[in-house]
Image: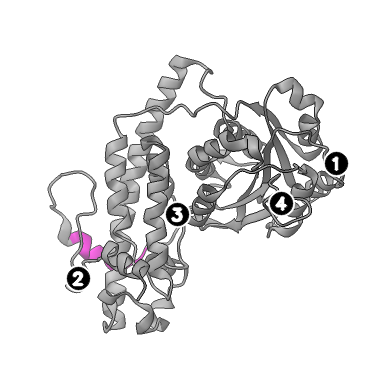
C-alpha cells in the first residue's frame, strides 16, 4: 500500500460500521431530530440538474514569462467563476457545468505552436484546480489563433443548441501572431455556437490596436482589458468561518471507491489547501462551489455521487473496490451507509447555500461602497461577461 493510500485511509475515516454518523450541521445547535434524520436517510434524493444542456467554459491562459500575475489571478478566481456559473438556470433547471484548461506561449511545451491542453472539458474540478496550480511560466511565442483552433476543434463540445459554449483567452502579445489565421478559426467556432471572449493584459487601447478586441467581435464574445499584475481584492465576511467549518464536515461525507479512490480523496483535501494558500476568502469560494451539485461532481471516485448517477451501482460494486470500513458488508448495509452520508451532505450543502447568500449580500454591499475600483481582474471580467451572454442565450441567474 502506498503512503498516499495510507494517508487517505486516515483522512477518510467514516463512522460506518455501526451505522452512526457525525452531526451534519456546521453549527453547535442541539442534535434533536437525529432519529428522523436516520429514518429519512434510506432514500438518496436525485440531483435537480438539466440533462438537456451544459455550460462549458474553456480557459486559455498565456504562460509566457510575463504572465505570473495572470496565473495568480486565475488561481484566485477559479472558484468565483464556478460559483457564477452555478447561479445560471435554463427553464428552471441548473445545467451541468464543465471547465477546460489550456496553456499557450510557453516554449517549455513540446508543440510547434507552444500550446497544451491541460485538462479536457470536465466536471472534475479538483483536477482543474490541481493542474492550474501546477502551471509555471516560461518564455515563448504566443499564438492565439493556434490555441483557439485546438480548443474549438479538439474539446468535446456539446451538440445541443441550448448549451452555452464559451472560450476565454487571456494574454498580452499581438492577437494575430503565428501562422493560424485567428479570424478563420474563431469564425468556424462561432458557426458551432462556441463564442470567443478575449482578455488583454494591459492598456485597453493597446489591446484594441493588437487585435484582441477584433477577436471578440469576430467571435461574438466580449473584449476586456485587465491589469494582470494587480492583486485580487478579497472582502472578509462574518460568514467565512462558518462556511469553512461546513467544508470540513462536507469532506467527511465522501466515501471513496476504486483502485485510485483514496488518492482522489487526498486530492480533494490538497485542493482545499491550495485554495486556502491563496486566501481565506478563496477557500470559502471553493467550499461554496463544492456545495453545488451541478458543478462539483465526483462520481468517478465517490460512492455517494456515483449512487446518485447510477442507482444500481452498489449492487455490482466489488468488495475489493471498497474502503476498509465497508469491506465485508452486505449490499443493504452499504446502501444504508451511503444513504446516511448522502443525507448528511445534502443538509450541509443546504447550510452552505444559505450562508453563501448572506455572504454574497455582505460582499455586494461592501463593493457598492467602494465603487468599481476593485473589479479590474480576470475573474471579474469573466463573471460579468458570463452573466451578459447567459441572458442573451435565454438563461436566468438566481
- For marks 3 and 2, give the CA distance: 25 Å
- The residue beneath circle 4 is 115
- The residue beneath circle 2 is 19
- For marks 1 and 3, give the CA distance: 37 Å
Q: Which mark is residue 135?
A: none
- The residue beneath circle 1 is 183
- Indicate the position of residue 349 as horizontal and vertical percent values: 35, 50
> Where, by quadrant of the figure, is residue 45 drawn?
bottom left
| 2 and 1 marks in contact (CB < 8 Å) | no
Above or below: residue 365 compared with residue 264: above
- For marks 4 and 3, give the CA distance: 32 Å
Q: If you read the primary sequence from the N terminus, does the residue marked by circle 1 or circle 3 appear first?
A: 1
Density class for disc 3 (Cα within 10 Å; few <14, some 14-19, many ≥20) is some
Main SS, magenta residues: helix
| 4 and 3 marks in contact (CB < 8 Å) | no
- For marks 1 and 4, give the CA distance: 18 Å
The stretch drawn in magenta includes residue 169: no
Density class for disc 2 (Cα within 10 Å; few <14, some 14-19, many ≥20) is some
- The residue beneath circle 3 is 293
Mark 2 or 1: in front is 1
Q: If you read the primary sequence from the N terminus, does the residue marked by circle 4 or circle 2 appear first?
A: 2
Q: If you read the primary sequence from the N terminus, does the residue marked by circle 1 or circle 4 appear first?
A: 4
What's drawn in magenta, residue-wise? 36-44
Density class for disc 1 (Cα within 10 Å; few <14, some 14-19, many ≥20) is some
Answer whether residue 132 is visible to the viewer in this image.
yes
Q: SS of the residue at dot 2? A: loop
- For marks 4 and 2, give the CA distance: 50 Å
Amino acid at each position: 500500500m502506498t503512503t498516499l493510500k495510507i494517508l487517505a485511509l486516515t483522512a477518510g475515516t467514516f463512522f460506518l460500521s455501526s451505522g452512526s454518523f457525525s452531526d451534519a450541521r456546521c453549527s453547535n445547535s442541539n442534535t434533536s431530530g437525529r432519529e428522523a434524520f436516520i429514518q429519512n436517510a434510506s432514500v438518496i434524493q436525485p440531483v435537480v440538474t438539466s440533462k438537456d444542456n451544459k455550460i462549458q467554459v474553456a480557459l486559455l491562459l498565456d504562460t509566457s514569462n510575463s504572465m505570473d500575475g495572470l496565473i495568480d489571478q486565475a488561481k484566485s478566481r477559479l472558484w468565483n467563476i464556478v460559483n457564477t456559473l452555478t447561479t445560471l438556470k435554463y427553464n428552471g433547471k441548473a445545467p451541468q457545468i464543465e471547465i477546460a484548461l489550456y496553456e499557450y506561449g510557453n516554449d517549455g511545451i513540446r508543440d510547434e505552436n507552444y500550446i497544451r491542453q491541460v485538462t479536457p472539458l470536465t466536471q472534475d474540478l479538483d483536477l482543474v484546480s490541481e493542474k492550474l496550480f501546477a502551471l509555471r511560466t516560461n518564455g515563448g511565442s504566443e499564438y492565439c489563433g493556434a490555441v483557439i483552433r485546438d480548443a474549438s476543434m479538439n474539446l468535446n463540445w456539446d451538440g445541443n443548441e441550448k448549451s452555452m459554449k464559451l472560450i476565454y483567452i487571456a494574454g498580452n502579445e499581438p492577437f494575430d501572431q503565428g501562422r493560424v489565421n485567428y479570424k478563420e478559426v474563431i469564425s468556424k467556432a462561432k458557426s458551432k455556437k462556441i463564442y470567443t471572449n478575449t482578455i488583454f493584459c494591459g492598456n485597453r487601447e493597446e489591446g484594441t490596436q493588437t487585435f484582441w478586441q477584433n477577436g471578440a467581435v469576430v467571435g461574438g464574445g466580449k473584449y476586456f482589458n485587465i491589469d494582470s499584475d494587480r492583486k485580487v481584492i478579497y472582502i472578509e465576511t462574518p460568514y467565512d468561518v462558518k462556511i469553512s467549518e461546513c467544508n470540513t464536515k462536507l469532506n467527511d461525507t465522501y466515501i471513496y471507491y476504486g483502485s485510485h479512490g483514496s488518492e482522489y480523496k487526498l486530492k480533494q483535501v490538497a485542493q482545499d489547501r491550495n485554495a486556502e494558500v491563496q486566501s481565506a476568502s478563496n477557500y470559502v469560494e471553493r467550499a461554496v462551489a463544492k456545495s453545488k451539485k451541478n458543478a462539483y461532481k465526483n462520481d468517478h471516485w465517490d460512492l455517494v455521487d456515483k449512487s446518485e448517477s447510477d442507482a444500481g451501482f452498489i449492487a455490482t460494486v466489488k468488495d475489493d473496490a471498497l474502503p476498509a470500513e465497508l469491506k465485508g458488508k452486505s449490499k443493504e448495509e452499504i446502501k444504508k451507509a451511503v444513504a446516511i452520508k448522502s443525507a448528511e451532505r445534502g443538509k450541509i450543502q443546504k447550510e452552505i447555500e444559505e450562508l453563501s447568500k448572506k455572504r454574497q449580500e455582505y460582499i455586494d454591499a461592501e463593493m457598492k461602497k467602494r465603487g468599481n475600483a476593485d473589479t479590474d481582474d480576470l475573474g471579474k471580467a469573466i463573471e460579468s461577461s458570463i452573466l451578459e451572454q447567459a441572458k442573451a442565450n435565454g438563461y436566468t441567474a438566481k
